[in-house]
Amino acid sequence: MDRFVWTNGLLEMDETLVIQQRGVRLYDGEDKAKLDVGVVLLSTHRLLWRDQKNNECCICIPLSQVIFFEEQAAGIGKSAKIVIHLHPVPENKEPGPYQQSKYSYIKLSFKEHGQIEFYRRLTEEMTQKRWENTPVSQPIPTGVGTKAGRTRAVGIVGIERKLEEKRKETDKNISEAFEDLSKLMEKAKEMVEVSKSIANKIKDKQGDITEDETIRFKSYLLSMGIANPVTRETHGSGTQYHIQLARQLGDILQAPLEERGGMMALTEVYCLVNRARGMELLSPEDLVNACKMFESLKLPLRLRVFDSGVMVVQLQSHSEEEMIASALDNVSDKGSLTAEEFAKLLGLSVLLSKERLLLAEKMGHLCRDDSVEGLRFYPNLF
Amino acid sequence: MHRRGVGAGAIAKKKLAEAKYKERGTVLAEDQIAQMSKQLETFKTHLEEFASKHKQEIRKNSQFRVQFQEMCATIGVDPLASGKGFWSEMLGVGDFYYELGVQIIEVCLALKHRNGGLIKLDELHYRVLKGRGKFAQDVSQDDLVRAIKKLKAMGNGFGMIPVGGSYLVQSVPAELNMDHTVVLQLAEKKGYVTVSEIRDSLKWERERACHVLDHLLKEGLAWLDSQAVEEPQYWLPALFSELLSRDITPEEANQMTP
């Protein structure tokens, strides 16, 4: 770790960023470095590391200092690492976080993965050695007194000025993004205030809101991503969008539901629908809100929540009695069944077959044998 | 006789109320809603501008995403509430997280029979990254956590249990109370736990320890090694790291796609 130097983290003129990965901890040889978790950056010229919490703390090392590197696989409770062996400390090295070290290698510990990609890019850069083609300006060594030295100094001043401008530009770009974000959030905050004010007035009945206006208001809230506690009790969270969605779902889900015995877990539906869409995906809440509208829209589907909290979409034609009767038949037939066995029998997911058995049990048709070997259901003879 | 319609009376009442409110200087709700429509259009323009400059930043830079999410939370806005929201449509944040949600569900489904529906966040991250392939957008654990929080809306018991400095992600509705959680945390170091260890570390009575372990067994979250040398060991597949090397088999993959 004594090869690292402090840096402002900005790239030089011909230096390009190759890859970065957050969630990386540095090791001085075998010991954890006295630094927190940070972002490791690979450029064409250097390896940099910046503290995630304190962006001011940034260190780097030229790639020319690397002798070789290797991967260290992850273990139990240990993240994957890349071990980097380094040349000895150069004489005119700038100050860095460590004055000395007993190790000649460091490790990058990838706590949030990304090591595969990083290793690949590091290999590429070490092979290509792009830093040799485009050297960046080095600090001028002191004591340059000859005429040639003075001429060189003048030329370098021009380069340094350009670098300074480039630094300011990069600086500006980085902070511009965050500045724009802050401004945007200020405006979003105003919208939140307005909608709160309206919601309060609706509650206090300051004004007569028509059905139409309520619908419009709810769609505004949906667009902004603001929760609407007031109208939810009276009208639910659904909007025109969800009504449309509910009808679409009514069409799309008919066939899949019939294939699966009339019932699908909501998470299954979520995957099915979003995989089919490819883009402009539904949020989990969109799906739930749309499903809640099935009944009022008189669609042949229902959203149902079991005692366990599992939410399913169910074909209305598949009545409760039918399901329970078939569960009882199957169990009586085999003498007894576990959820897994039942699932195999019907071609259903284990989760849903368990729910059916529980339902039949609730209605008094089955009883359970609960042991560490599993939950088994028997016809209720009591 | 001059018939006074009900309508006329209602209108008169309304006009009176309006006048009263206007006197007090308060704007009526319906007027504000009309005004909001205009303000929303303006905001949309600002968002479009922002998107044209920084949409890529959000997609590529996970730090920027975190910042964005935290600022939204501070002002009381949920950018992931709906695919139809402005944030989702214009910044594309929605599709990023909703797709991640699909991938998370699929991994959890495929591995459920191995680990009972409990998986380390590290392992989930690893497998999701793997499934996404080399050329897909990298995701951080923070991204996963946010996607999982959204999945909770669909029931099915998606939750996160803090264990050993990270989290266990639960994807089944198994009831896990404080006792279960504490035992899971105890088992984290070695991947298994014994009754003696529970009694020593937590100072519980044998019955309480056995009760918790039995529940974990029943839910398929723990496996019993009754042939262990000193005393039976309760292993938690969710905590194994060796399983990382075992790929998802074709049969398990079939479980993934509904």
Image (cartoon, helix red, strand yellow):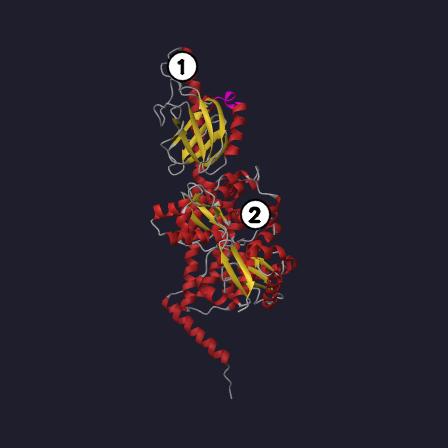
Name the front one of labels 1 and 2: 2
10 Å neighbourhood of mark 1: few (<14), some, or many (≥20)?
Answer: few
What residue range appears in magenta?
A128-135
Quadrant of the rendered structure where residue A104 is?
top left
Give the x, y percent position of residue B149. 47, 51
Residue at mark 1 to residue at mark 2: CA–CA distance: 70 Å
Give the x, y percent position of residue B62. 47, 41
10 Å neighbourhood of mark 2: few (<14), some, or many (≥20)?
Answer: many
Q: Is residue B66 above or below residue B26?
A: above
Residue A131 included in the magenta stretch of the image: yes
Give the x, y percent position of residue A271. 58, 52
| Quadrant in which the N terminus of chain A appears | top left
Q: Is residue A280 above or below residue A236?
A: above
Residue tagged 1: A150
Quadrant of the rendered structure where residue B84 is?
bottom right
Q: Is residue B66 above or below residue A167?
A: below
Closer to the camera, B113 or A181? B113
